[in-house]
Image: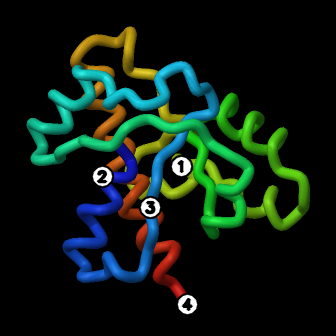
Amino acid sequence: MAEVAFQRILEREHATDRFTIDSAGLIGFHAGELPDSRMRYHAGKRGYTMTHRSRPFTRSDFDRFDMIIGMDDQNIKGLNNQAHTLDEKNKIQRMTDFCRNIDADHVPDPYYSGDQGFENVIDLLEDACEGLYEAVNTP
């Protein structure tokens, strides 16, 4: 969801040519699958189309991207375990560190929280993506 929210901001700001965005998971169990149908439904209500397929995070992602963003403590720990250098560790950021209006220390798993859980996660990610955009555009 974060990648489509950030992509929307890039389109709004006419900055799509300045960034490469991707999404990956630390567990390859759902590799090749679309996002959860409930997330696609709730995102669709806000005009997002989620068509990307899940892929596992790989060590080469540290070379491909300037920032690697984790959603919660487990993600951050898993990413840090894969980072071999200080430069790689310094690329790892927590999504909620970019929140501007919502006070949160992680992106919760919405899958057992019903409709409101998905709506809350989308609210949080939209807020964090706005803050992320501001952060990467501040000289």
Say the numbered circle drawn on residue 95: 1
| Residue bearing mark 3 | 21
- Kindly report the distance in space between the C-alpha atoms of the residues bearing marks 2 and 4: 24 Å
- Kindly report the distance in space between the C-alpha atoms of the residues bearing marks 1 and 3: 14 Å
SS state under label 3: loop
The amino acid at mark 1 is: Met
- Kindly report the distance in space between the C-alpha atoms of the residues bearing marks 3 and 4: 20 Å
Mark 2 neighbour class, 10 Å CA radius: few under 14, some 14 to 19, many 20 or more: many
- Kindly report the distance in space between the C-alpha atoms of the residues bearing marks 3 and 2: 9 Å
Corner quadrant of residue 58: top right
- Disc 2 to disc 4: CB gap under 8 Å: no
- Kindly report the distance in space between the C-alpha atoms of the residues bearing marks 1 and 2: 14 Å
- Disc 1 to disc 3: CB gap under 8 Å: no
* Residue 133 place in picture, x, y as percent: 42, 70
| Residue bearing mark 4 | 139
Of tags 2 and 4, which is closer to the observer?
2
Residue occupying the point 33% across, 43% down: 52
